[in-house]
Image (cartoon, rainbow, N blue to C red):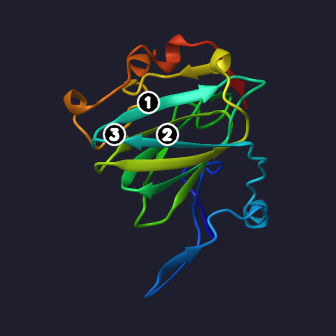
C-alpha cells in the first residue's frame, strides 16, 4: 500500500496494491495495520455507497459536528471523481484551503479525509460509484456543509458551474465565512 501526503499533510492519498492476471484482479483495499503505519489511525464504523448517473454531479462539501465528526476513506469502484477536502479547523495554517485528487476505478487510489475537513466530489464519468468508510455514524442533527462554489475557497471544479448537478440540500449550503467555528486545530 502506497501512502502519499498531499499539500495539506493530514489528507493522504492511499493506493493499495492490485494484482492482475487473466482471471481479473485481487486487491487488499483496506488494511488497518498498513494505515496505522502511515499515521492513519481510525476506527471505521460504517460504509456508505453512492451512485451518480451523470458526469458533473457535485456532492458536498459535507461534514459532521462533534461528537459525531467523521473521518472518511473514499474510493471509487466504477467511474471517476474529482475528490476534494477543505480544512475547516480554525487555527490551522491551512484553514480554508483545499486539496484534491482524481480517484477512479482505473487508478485504484483512495483519499483519507480526517475529521475537521469538509468533503465533496464531482463525478467525471457516467454511472460513477463511490464507496467510503466513515469513523462515526451518520447523524442528521450534526450534519453540516459548505457551499460547493465558495469563492473564498476557490475550488477549481472540472465542470462549468452551469453544468453542475446538485441536490436541493446542497444548493442551500452557505460559504465558510458565514459559519460558526466548528473545529479548532
Question: Residue 51: which quarter of the image?
Answer: top left
- 163 vs 178, left or right, is left
Asked if labels 1 and 2 touch by Cβ distance under 8 angstroms, the answer is: yes
Residue density around tag 2, few if under 14, some if 14–19, many if 20 or more, within 10 Å: many
Residue density around tag 1, few if under 14, some if 14–19, many if 20 or more, within 10 Å: some
Q: Earlier in the sequence, mark 2 or mark 1?
A: 2
The percent coordinates of residue 38 (x first, y second) are: 72, 62
Alpha carbon separation for disc pair 2 and 1: 7 Å
Q: Nearer the viewer, residue 98 or 110?
A: 110
Residue at far bottom of view: 22
The answer to whether residue 136 is above or below residue 166 is: below
Residue at position x 79%, y 65% from top?
33
Disc 1, SS: loop
The answer to whether residue 65 is above or below residue 19 is: above
Residue density around tag 3, few if under 14, some if 14–19, many if 20 or more, within 10 Å: few
Residue at far front of view: 23
The percent coordinates of residue 101 (x first, y second) are: 45, 53
Residue at position x 58%, y 37% from top?
94
Q: Earlier in the sequence, mark 2 or mark 3?
A: 2
Disc 2, SS: strand
Residue designated by label 1: 153
Question: Residue 141: which quarter of the image?
Answer: top right
Alpha carbon separation for disc pair 1 and 3: 9 Å
Res. 98 mark: 2
Residue at position x 74%, y 27% from top?
68
Res. 156 mark: 3
Alpha carbon separation for disc pair 2 and 3: 10 Å
Res. 24 mark: none
- 131 vs 149, left or right, is right
Amino acid at each position: 500500500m502506497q501512502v502519499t501526503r498531499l499539500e495539506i499533510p493530514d489528507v493522504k492519498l492511499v493506493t493499495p496494491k492490485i494484482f492482475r492476471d487473466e482471471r481479473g484482479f485481487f486487491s487488499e483495499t483496506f488494511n488497518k495495520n498498513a494505515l496505522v503505519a502511515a499515521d492513519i489511525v481510525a476506527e471505521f464504523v460504517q460504509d456508505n455507497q453512492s451512485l451518480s448517473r451523470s458526469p458533473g454531479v457535485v456532492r458536498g462539501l459535507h461534514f459532521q459536528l462533534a461528537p459525531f465528526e467523521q473521518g472518511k476513506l473514499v474510493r471509487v469502484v466504477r467511474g471517476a471523481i474529482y475528490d476534494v477536502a477543505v480544512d475547516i479547523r480554525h487555527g490551522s495554517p491551512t484553514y480554508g484551503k483545499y486539496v484534491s485528487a482524481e480517484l477512479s476505478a482505473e487508478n485504484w487510489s483512495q483519499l483519507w479525509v480526517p475529521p475537521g475537513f469538509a468533503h465533496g466530489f464531482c463525478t467525471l464519468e457516467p454511472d460513477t460509484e463511490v464507496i467510503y468508510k466513515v469513523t462515526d455514524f451518520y447523524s442528521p442533527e450534526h450534519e453540516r456543509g459548505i457551499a460547493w462554489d465558495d469563492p473564498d475557497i476557490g475550488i477549481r471544479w472540472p465542470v462549468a458551474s452551469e453544468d453542475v448537478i446538485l441536490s436541493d440540500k446542497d444548493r442551500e449550503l452557505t460559504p465558510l465565512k458565514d459559519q460558526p467555528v466548528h473545529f479548532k486545530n
